[in-house]
Image (tube, rainbow, N blue to C red):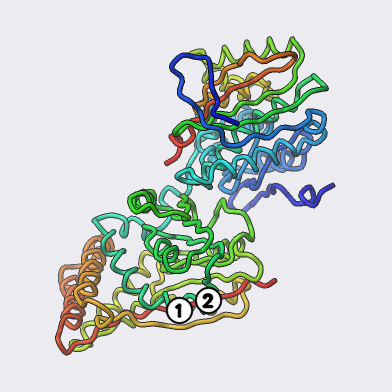
Amino acid sequence: MSPYDLLPRFKAQYDANNQEFSISGVVRPQAIDELGPSIALLRDAIGRVRGVLYVNVRRLTQMNNAAFHAFSRIIIDACRARPDLKFVVITSSVVGWTSRKFGRLSGIEPNITVEEYDSEFYPGQGFLEEGGFVPILRSQTKMTWRHERAILPRHGMRQGIVMADICCGIGDFAVLVQKEFQPSRIVALDHSISSLNYARQVMREFDIRGIEYTYGDASEMLLDEAQFDLVTCRHSLQIFNRPELILKELYRICKPGGRVYITNEKNSHCLGEPRAESIRWTYNEVAKLFGHFEMDVELGPKSRRYLMEAGFEDIRVETFMVTNLDGDPQDFADVIAAWADVYAGEMATRRGDGAEFVARFRQGFQDHIFAALHPKGYAGWPIWVASGRRPQ
Amino acid sequence: MGPVQHDLAGEPTFEPMIQIDMEIKGFVSAWRHCDYVSTYMARMISQNRSDSVRHSNLFSSAFNELLEVAFRTRHADGELACRVSRHGATDRIELTFPCVPEERQFYEEAVSQVAGTEARERYLNSVSGDLAPSREIVLLELAVDYNATLRVEEADGDVIRLVVDLPLEGLQH
């Protein structure tokens, strides 16, 4: 027996509180007998539930037809024996075959519905994807890169490594890393199809090699365990309502001895002179606004705690301030203007903010721009960088 | 190994990507070989696809089913050859393995039915009615869920060659 044979290949569980049967991993049995305990668990779950049984296959990487037939038959038979019972199969849009394959079941039994759980996954994704935000994202990366290119080597970046950039967005950070540090391979993952399309277009136009863009869910990735020397995840934990889930995955795909590198903000610490009070008030309100949508843009200084709780060691934390003095102050001003459009626009509207609040809210952004462009002014946007090593 | 050539007039040339040959005795000695081979080959050929991770997952899923079909051959001697070639968005799997004459006839009939208009309905009937999928249903599922096209090619001796075209790039987001 090889070590491979000893690895648990799949896991089935039943959560009575949520009436949820879940099966994950690689399920490729030769004979149905191999599934005995899992099938018994599903039957038992069906016998216990009232109303709806959720069948969670989000983390089901592979399932052969033999296993699919076996589980499907139990569900279909249960529908026929108990018309009062409904089944909701929860698939992931990331695992391409699951929605197609399980989706067929609703055509057989109307009491079976199939839902892609991550079709509206990131609370903030909609706000940031639309409305021509790409140029702003590029400007942001250009501004942070001036600092990060010097910081990254202190956190494990070096030539020839295998790295992953999780929540890569439009891929501009991956491209800059590829040019500056020449890792041997970069896997760049994001959950935004439009961002990935943009990233691939850039890669084709500029004939960039060595970056593999992939669609994925950062909290449940298809990537294998322990394969990357460095895993980066920038400005993303803060817009995810359960950052610990992402960190768990970053830890999983990182090699023992490798590092996970995260960057986050503390928006209430954005600052400027002159008009400091107005600016401070507005960015305090930004933090509250994101909080309303379950995003924590104050996460930066909490990075150390998050990394420790995720099991990392040798944690390193540092900060840098992007300012209007770094490059062209107009770039800084353009970024603030874009924030104002989204935060004091769609987000404030969706929260139901009144006109008076929005006017004051918007004024703080205008004052930040004023400070950035003022000949004697100073405007800053602080970023927290943190990394931890996965224990050997 | 040169480009894969076919007799069918007007068919594009598929460029070879990878080939694995095994003694059938060795292959059928462990069920896990289906998983090993499908996973390994999927990773190798997906590197330069637009989404390598998702492509690899889809390809492995489809290819494993074919290997499981070959695993159940009743012929005890000979070689299994798995060849993958590519034309644009389509990956072609050519799976050559020994089989007895009755099996050969079975595959020819099964593949001819895959192209039928009622393929989806027959597949759904199987899912709702059969305890386990037959080899015919496994081939049918490739057409229904992966938009695969299948054919049986002429091969010498007691062997069969299944040719399966998988347009997986088009299945992705």
Find residue A61 and report its horizontal and vertical position in percent: 60, 45
**B167 versus B39 height, above or below:** above
Find residue B24 and report its horizontal and vertical position in percent: 78, 28
* Residue at the extreme right: A1
- Can see residue A21? yes
**Residue where numbered disc 1 is placed:** A151
Camera-side residue of B157 and A230: B157
- Indicate the quadrant where residue A41 lies: top right
Secondary structure of the residue carrying tag 1 is helix
Find residue B13 and report its horizontal and vertical position in percent: 48, 26
Circle 2 chain: A
**Residue where numbered disc 2 is placed:** A155
State which quarter of the image contains the C terminus of chain A.
Answer: bottom right
Residue plotted at (38% across, 50% down): A200
Q: Give the class, few, some or many, for how many residues have Cα within 10 Å of label 2's Cα (few <14, many ≥20).
A: many
**A90 versus B12 height, above or below:** below
Number of marks in the image? 2
- Indicate the quadrant where residue B34 lies: top right
- Three-letter code, disc 2: His
Residue plotted at (56% across, 20% down): B150
Q: Give the class, few, some or many, for how many residues have Cα within 10 Å of label 1's Cα (few <14, many ≥20).
A: some
A261 horizontally vs A120: left or right: right
Camera-side residue of A67 and A50: A67
Whether residues under marks 1 and 2 lie with C-beta atoms below 8 angstroms apart, the answer is yes
**A280 versus A42 height, above or below:** below
Circle 1 chain: A
Residue plotted at (59% across, 15% down): B111
- Three-letter code, disc 1: Ile
Secondary structure of the residue carrying tag 2 is helix
Camera-side residue of A177 and A241: A177
From mark 1 to mark 2, how far is it between C-alphas? 7 Å
A374 horizontally vs A181: left or right: left
